[in-house]
Image (tube, helix red, strand yellow):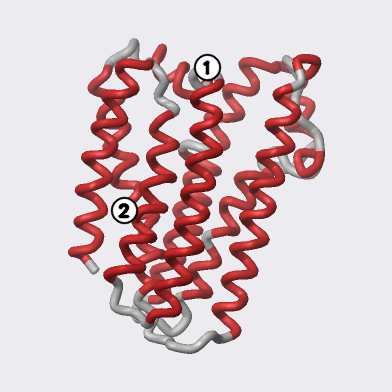
Amino acid sequence: MLDALGIVWLVAALAMAAVWALQVRTRNAGFVDVAWAALLGLAALYYGLVADGAFLPRLLVALLAATWGFRLALHLLHRVLNEREDGRYAHLRAHWQGNQWKFFAFFQAQALAVVLFSLPFLVAAGNPTEELNLWMVLGVLIWAGSLSGESIADLQLARFRADPRNRGSTCRAGLWRYSRHPNYFFEWTHWFAYVCLAVGAPYGWLTLTGSTLMLISLCWVSGIPFVEAQSLRSRGDDYREYQRTTSM
C-alpha cells in the first residue's frame, strides 16, 4: 500500500511543479484545482491496476473514481480557460504579494492532498470480495446520485453566471435555492461510495478519511470560507441576505 501511495505522491509532486510553472506564465492559479481532480482520476486508474483486491472492486473503483475526477477536472478547466482567475486565488496573490515560493508550497500541499484523498480508492480497490453484493450496489447508487447532483448544481450555476443580467447578484436557481453550496454537498456525499465499496476490505475504515477530510476542507479550510469571503467582497448585502435565508 505504501509503495502505491509513494508513486502517486511522486507523480503528483512533479505534476504540481509543472502546473505551478504554468501558473507563473499565465498568472492563473486555478489550474491547481484542475490538476488536483485529474490526478485523483489517474490515481484511481492506477490503483485499479495494482491493488491486491478482486477484479470487480478494482474495476468499480477505477471506473467510478476516474469518471468523477475527470468530469470535475474538465468542468474546472472550462472555467479556468474562459474566466479570470478565481477571486480566491487573486486574493491570495495580493495577500502574498505575488510571492511565487508561497504559491509553490501551496501547489505541493495539493500534491500531498492528492495522496490523502486517494487513500479511500486504494483501500476499496483492495477489497477481496469477488461477487457483486448489496454494499457495492449501494456504493454505485451513492456515486450516481452524488455525481448527478453535483453536475446539476454546476450547470445551474453556469447558466446563471452566463446571463449578464445576473451580474452582481447571487444564484438562487434550482438547488441553489435550498443550499448555498449544493455542489459541495454532493461532492462530500460522493466519498461515501468508497466506504460502501470497501466493506469487507482490510482496513476498510480508512475509507472514512475521504468524507472526513472533504468535510473539514469544505467547511473550515479551502472551500466555503474562501468562497463566501469572496462572495461578500463581490456581492455584499445581496450575499449577506442569502447567508441569512439559505442553509450552508
Residue 16: x and y in percent read 28, 36
Residue 42: x and y in percent read 36, 53
Q: Report if the CB atoms under discs 1 and 2 are less than 8 Å apart.
A: no
Q: Nearer the viewer, residue 44 or 88?
A: 44
Mark 2 burial class by Cα count in 10 Å: few <14, some 14-19, many 20+: many
For residue 133, above or below residue 69 = below
Is 173 on the left-hand or right-hand side of 229?
right
Classify mark 2: helix, strand or loop.
Answer: helix
Identify the image quadrant of the C terminus.
top right
Classify mark 1: helix, strand or loop.
Answer: loop
Name the residue located 51 percent from the left edge and 39 percent from the top edge. 74
Which sits earlier in the primary sequence, circle 1 or circle 2?
Answer: 1
Q: Which residue is mark 1?
A: 84
Residue 127: x and y in percent read 39, 80
Mark 1 vs mark 2: give the one in front. Answer: 1
For residue 215, above or below residue 29 = below
Is 170 on the left-hand or right-hand side of 106?
right
Q: Quadrant of residue 145?
A: bottom right
Name the residue located 29 percent from the left edge and 78 percent from the top edge. 52
Identify the amino acid type marked 1.
Answer: Arg
Identify the amino acid type marked 2.
Answer: Val
Q: Which residue is mark 2?
A: 115
Mark 1 burial class by Cα count in 10 Å: few <14, some 14-19, many 20+: few
Name the residue located 39 percent from the left edge and 51 percent from the top edge. 40
Is 181 on the left-hand or right-hand side of 16?
right
